[in-house]
Image (cartoon, helix red, strand yellow):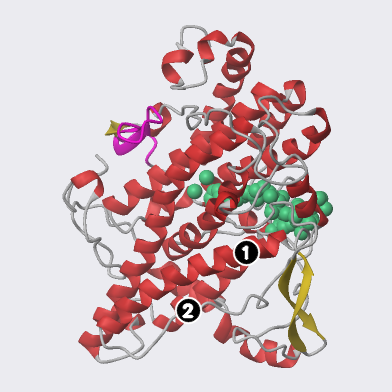
C-alpha cells in the first residue's frame, strides 16, 4: 500500500526509520493486521468515534493521549521501556552477565516459543470479545471494551516487533501465523486453554479482565526479568497498559456486586434475578470458572520447561530483584500442593521445577486482594455473604489436579458428588441463558443496564455521562 506513511502511522521509540528491513516486514504485516482487526475487533463500532487513549511515548508523564478516533485509525505503536544502563541478568546460570541485546543462538527456540505464546493470547482475547460491542451496558463500558481491545492489538504488535526484528524469516512466519489462528477454532485454535473459551456476555468479560488479564500481569512481569533485553523492555511497557485492563475487570465486577446488593436490600430478597440483577450465587460460580481456567495458564506445578526458562535466563520470577536468595535456586525447595489418593498434601519440591507454582501463588494472593475489595461492597450493604476463591485444585485441566475431582473448599470428592454438585459450583446453561437475557445494549448517554451500577468516576476526568462513543 504505497502512499501510507508508516513512520507516521506507527509511533515508536525503536528507530524504525533507520531499520529498513524491519520497516519492510511491518509494512507487509500491517495490512494483514488491519484486515484481521476489521473482522475481529469490537463488532458494530468500527466506524464510530471512540474516546480512546493512545500511547505516544514511554515518558510516564506523557505517554498517553486522549481523543476521539475510529478504531481502525488507532496508531498501534511500538514502545519499549527506557533501557536500564549496564543491565545485567539477575538470575540463573548467566546471573551477573550483561543482558543480551541480540538473541543468543542456544536460547533462540525457547525465546521464540515464549514470545509466540505470549503474542497468541493478545489477538485471541480480541476474538473472544468480538461480539460484546452489540450488548454494551453503557457508553462508558463500550469505550473501555474498545480501549482494552486496541491495546491487546498493540500487545500483538509488541510481540510481532520482537519476532520481525530478531528472528528473521522464522519470526515473520510466526507473525503471520498469529493472525491465522482463531480463538475456539477446532482446526487452528489459539495456543492456551483459556483463550479458546467463549466470552459470551459482559459478566464473563469483566471476570476475564479481572482473572485472565491478571495472568498477563504475572507472565509479563516474569518476562520483564528476561536476560533478552528487548523482551524485558517491551514487557515493562506493556505492564503499564495491563493495569487498565485489570481496573476494568475489578471495577466491572465490583459495580455488578454493588447493583446486586442494592436490589437485595430494596426487595429484601436474595434472588434478584426477577428484578434484573445477577444474584451473588451466580457471581460466585462465574468467579469459580474464570479463576480456575486462569490458574491453568500458569502450567504444571512441576515443570522442567519452567526450570529451563529460569536457568537459561530467559524468564525470571515475579519481582526477581526483590527476592532475597541466590537467584539460582539449585539447592532450594518450594512447597507444592498435590493430590495424594483422597487427600491433598503439601510436598517440598525442588524450587526450580516448581517455578510455575510459585508464580501461581503470587497470582492467587493478588486475586484474593481484589475479591476482598468486592466483599467490602457486600459488607457495607450489611449482607452476610462472602465471595471466595475456590481451592486451587478445583476444576483444573492442567497439572497434577487435572482429572482429579476437587470441591471448591478443597476436598477430593467422588465423581458422584461432583456430578451432584456441579451446578452449584460452576455456571450452568441456565445461568448463561439468564445472564444472556440481560444483555441488551444501553447506549444512551449516562444510562446503565439494570444489572450494573455506574462507575465512581469517568475516564480521564470526564463526567460519567460523557459521550464516550459518538453514534
Ligand atoms: N493451555 O511444562 P508445562 C495475557 C502446555 S496472558 C494449553 O506445564 P510451561 C493476556 C505447555 O505449553 C499471559 N496448553 O508448562 C491475558 C507445554 O506444551 P509443550 C500469556 C498448556 O511450559 C488476557 C505443556 O503444556 N503469557 O497476556 O512451564 C488478555 C507442558 O507444560 C497450558 C504467557 O503465557 C494451558 N493453559 O508453562 C490478553 C507467557 N499450560 O511444550 C492477554 C509465555 C501449559 O509440551 N508462556 N500448556 O508443547 C509461558 O511462560 C509458558 O508457555 C506457560 C506454560 C506458563 C504458558
Ligand atoms: Fe495484553
Ligand atoms: Fe490485557
For residue 178, side relative to residue 45 (left or right) = right
Q: Is mark 2 within 8 Å of ligand 1?
A: no
Which of 435 and 17 lies nearest the eye of the viewer? 17
Characterize the local packing of mark 1: few (<14), some (14-19) or many (20 or more) Cα atoms within 10 angstroms.
many
Q: Earlier in the sequence, mark 2 or mark 1?
A: 2
Location of residue 339 with respect to 59 vertically, above or below: below
Q: Is residue 156 visible?
A: no
Instruction: Let me know if residue 214 is in the magenta part.
Output: no
In the picture, the disc for residue 360 is 1
Location of residue 9 with respect to 196 vertically, above or below: above
Check disc 2 and report its element: helix, strand or loop: helix
Q: Is mark 1 within 8 Å of ligand 1?
A: no
Q: Residue 223, located in which quarter of the rendered image?
A: top right
Q: Which residue is mark 2?
A: 284
The magenta span reads 45-64
Pointers 2 and 1 in contact (CB under 8 A)? no
Which of 268 and 249 lies nearest the eye of the viewer? 249
Check disc 1 and report its element: helix, strand or loop: helix
Amino acid at each position: 500500500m504505497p502512499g501510507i506513511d508508516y513512520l507516521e502511522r506507527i509511533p515508536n521509540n525503536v528507530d524504525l526509520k533507520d531499520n529498513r528491513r524491519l520497516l519492510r516486514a511491518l509494512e507487509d504485516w500491517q495490512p494483514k493486521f488491519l484486515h484481521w482487526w476489521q473482522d475481529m475487533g469490537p463488532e458494530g463500532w468500527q466506524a464510530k468515534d471512540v474516546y480512546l487513549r493512545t500511547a505516544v511515548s514511554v515518558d510516564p508523564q506523557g505517554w498517553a493521549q486522549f481523543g476521539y478516533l475510529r478504531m481502525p485509525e488507532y496508531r498501534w505503536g511500538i514502545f519499549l521501556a527506557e533501557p536500564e544502563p549496564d543491565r545485567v541478568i539477575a538470575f540463573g546460570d548467566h546471573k551477573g552477565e550483561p543482558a543480551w541485546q541480540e538473541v543468543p543462538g542456544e536460547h533462540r527456540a525457547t525465546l521464540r516459543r515464549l514470545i509466540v505464546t505470549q503474542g497468541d493470547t493478545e489477538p485471541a482475547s480480541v476474538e473472544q470479545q468480538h461480539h460484546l460491542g452489540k450488548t454494551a451496558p453503557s457508553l462508558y463500558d463500550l469505550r473501555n471494551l474498545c480501549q482494552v481491545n486496541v491495546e491487546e492489538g498493540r500487545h500483538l504488535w509488541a510481540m510481532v516487533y520482537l519476532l520481525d526484528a530478531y528472528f528473521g524469516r522464522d519470526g515473520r512466519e510466526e507473525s503471520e501465523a498469529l493472525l491465522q489462528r482463531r480463538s475456539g477454532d477446532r482446526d487452528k485454535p489459539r495456543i492456551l486453554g483459556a483463550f479458546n473459551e467463549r466470552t459470551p456476555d459482559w459478566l464473563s468479560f469483566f471476570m476475564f479482565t479481572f482473572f485472565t488479564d491478571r495472568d498477563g500481569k504475572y507472565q509479563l512481569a516474569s518476562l520483564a526479568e528476561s536476560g533478552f533485553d528487548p523482551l524485558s523492555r517491551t514487557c515493562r511497557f506493556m505492564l503499564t497498559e495491563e493495569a487498565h485492563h485489570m481496573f476494568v475487570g475489578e471495577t466491572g465486577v465490583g459495580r455488578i456486586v454493588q447493583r446486586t446488593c442494592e436490589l437485595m436490600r430494596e426487595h429484601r430478597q436474595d434472588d434478584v434475578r426477577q428484578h434484573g440483577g445477577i444474584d451473588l450465587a451466580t457471581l460466585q460460580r462465574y468467579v469459580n470458572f474464570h479463576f480456575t481456567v486462569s490458574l491453568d495458564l500458569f502450567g504444571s506445578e512441576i515443570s522442567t520447561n519452567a526450570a529451563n526458562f529460569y536457568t537459561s535466563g530467559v524468564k525470571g520470577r515475579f519481582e526477581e530483584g526483590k527476592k532475597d536468595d541466590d537467584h539460582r535456586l539449585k539447592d532450594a525447595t518450594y512447597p507444592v500442593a498435590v493430590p495424594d489418593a483422597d487427600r491433598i498434601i503439601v510436598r517440598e519440591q525442588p524450587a526450580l521445577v516448581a517455578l510455575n507454582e510459585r508464580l501461581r501463588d503470587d497470582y492467587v494472593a493478588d486475586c484474593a486482594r481484589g475479591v476482598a475489595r468486592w466483599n467490602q461492597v457486600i459488607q457495607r450493604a450489611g449482607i452476610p455473604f462472602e465471595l471466595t476463591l475456590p481451592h486451587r485444585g478445583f476444576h483444573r485441566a492442567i497439572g497434577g489436579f487435572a482429572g482429579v475431582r476437587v470441591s471448591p473448599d478443597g476436598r477430593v470428592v467422588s465423581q458422584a458428588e461432583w456430578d451432584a454438585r456441579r451446578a452449584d459450583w460452576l455456571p450452568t446453561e441456565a445461568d448463561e441463558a439468564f445472564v444472556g437475557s440481560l444483555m441488551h445494549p444501553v447506549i444512551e448517554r449516562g444510562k446503565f443496564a439494570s444489572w450494573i451500577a455506574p462507575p465512581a468516576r469517568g475516564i480521564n476526568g470526564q463526567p460519567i455521562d460523557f459521550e464516550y462513543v459518538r453514534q
